[in-house]
Image (spheres, grey):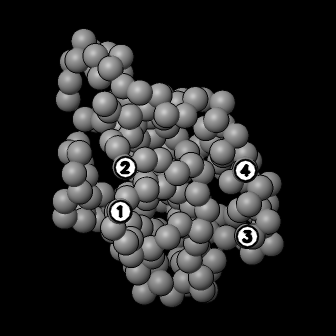
Amino acid sequence: MPNVAEARGILNSSDILFTAEEVDAAVDRMALDITAKLGDSYPLILSVMGGAVVFTGQLLPRLIFPLDFDYVHVSRYGDKTQGGELVWRQAPKEDVRDRVVLVLDDILDEGQTMAAIRDKVMEMGAKSFYSAVFANKLISKEKPIAADFVGLDVPDRYVFGYGMDVRGIWRNLPAIHALK
């Protein structure tokens, strides 16, 4: 983990891709889209810890329909900048059988993590699976899953802020930044 001076240096040398206002507007739009599609289904919403915590905290109050909430903790990154082996730390505690399940995550990068969550949730007996990601990274290779709801498309750069970290820091930023 970088010290304070290093952390400020990372932030000061980054590019702002989306302002806090653009981020907020994207979450508003997503809430409307999710409500239109799932508002009558009483879904179980699963947040992917820890990256999705900011997105989840902003999205949930905008979903004005009954829902159940739980989380999963699975990661491929840790504090690294490249994906590694998938590690399950917490499967859903709520029973997903015969439920409409919506999984929230901060970013759909290569799609491996979300695809693994989908497979696990469906193996556990969910009726249907939907995914909502705040950021969809535009990469050149095909992904094993496409998100049903997307806040913003981001370029194929290392992005951080709004739940996404760089070297374990800056998840708390209200805007989306990218390393140079």
Labels 2 and 1: the sequence-earlier one: 1
Mark 1 residue element? loop
Give the answer, above or below, for where 125 lies relative to 91. Answer: below
Quarter of the figure with the N terminus:
top left
Amino acid type, residue under disc 4 in the picture: Arg
Tell me which residue sits at (22%, 51%) in the image: 82
Tell me which residue sits at (45%, 40%) in the image: 163
Mark 2 and mark 3: span between their CA atoms? 30 Å
Q: Where residue 161 sits in the image (x, y, percent)?
A: 44, 34
Tell me which residue sits at (19%, 59%) in the image: 84
Disc nearest the viewer among 4 and 3 = 4
User: Would you name the residue on which mark 2 appears?
Assistant: 156
Labels 2 and 4: the sequence-earlier one: 4
Mark 3 and mark 1: span between their CA atoms? 31 Å
Mark 1 and mark 4: span between their CA atoms? 26 Å
Disc nearest the viewer among 2 and 3 = 2
Marks 4 & 3, CB-CB < 8 Å contact: no
Few, some or many C-alpha atoms within 10 Å of disc 3 (few <14, some 14-19, many ≥20)?
Answer: some
Amino acid type, residue under disc 3 in the picture: Leu
Give the answer, above or below, for where 135 lies relative to 144. Answer: above
User: Would you name the residue on which mark 3 appears?
Assistant: 38
Few, some or many C-alpha atoms within 10 Å of disc 2 (few <14, some 14-19, many ≥20)?
Answer: few
In the displayed structure image, the side of residue 94 where residue 3 appears, left or right: left
User: Which residue is more in the foreground, 140 or 175?
Assistant: 140
Marks 2 & 1, CB-CB < 8 Å contact: yes
Labels 2 and 3: the sequence-earlier one: 3
User: Would you name the residue on which mark 1 appears?
Assistant: 140
User: Would you name the residue on which mark 4 appears?
Assistant: 29
Q: Where residue 3 sits in the image (x, y, percent)?
A: 21, 18
Labels 3 and 1: the sequence-earlier one: 3
